[in-house]
Image: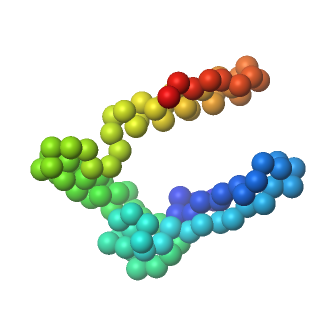
Amino acid sequence: MRARELQLCLDQDYQNARYVRRYVAPGDGEFARFQPAAGIAMGYDDLKVVEASRLVQSIAAGKPHGATVEDALAAAEIVEAMSESARSGRWITIRQ
């Protein structure tokens, strides 16, 4: 699977799970500003332009535009819980 697509599991039957493949396309975030059609990867430079634009918008508006440090912390806690769950073989509670 490449970065320009998402494979989504449609149910919880792991043995016979059904999946759908979703390609990034115009209309998904800032994608249309850089690519003309679905399934074409955005480059590193393109993503940095998007990040810089969101930073400038955040500064100008005085409030976050896009992901925040709190979002990054929550994502890191989830990844840590997943690693612990895989290591220990048990469910891990994540605080909300």
Measuring from the top left, give residue 42's x and y in whole percent.
42, 64
- Horizontal side of 4 relative to 73 (left or right) equals right
The picture places residue 20, in percent across and down from the top left corner, at 69, 65
Residue at coordinates 53% horizontally, 72% vertically from top-left? 39
Image quadrant containing the N terminus: bottom right
Residue 72 in view in this figure: yes
Residue at left 65%, top 66%?
21
Q: Residue, x 33% and y 62% (percent of image)?
A: 46
Q: Using the image, determine if residue 18 lies above or below residue 15.
A: below
Q: Looking at this view, name the residue that lies furthest to the front.
A: 96
Looking at this view, name the residue that lies furthest to the bottom: 36
Q: Nearer the viewer, residue 64 or 25?
A: 64
Outermost residue toward the left? 60
47 displayed left or right of 59 = right
Query: Which residue: 78% across, 60% down?
Result: 18
Residue 58, image x and y in percent?
20, 48
The residue closer to the viewer here, 14 or 47, is: 14
2 or 96, which is in the foreground? 96
Q: Residue furthest top?
A: 88
Q: Is residue 52 visible?
A: no
Total labels drawn: 0
Task: Look at the image and name its color scheme.
Answer: rainbow
Residue 48's x, y, as percent? Answer: 30, 54
Left or right: 77 with respect to 19? left
Image quadrant in which you'd find residue 85: top right
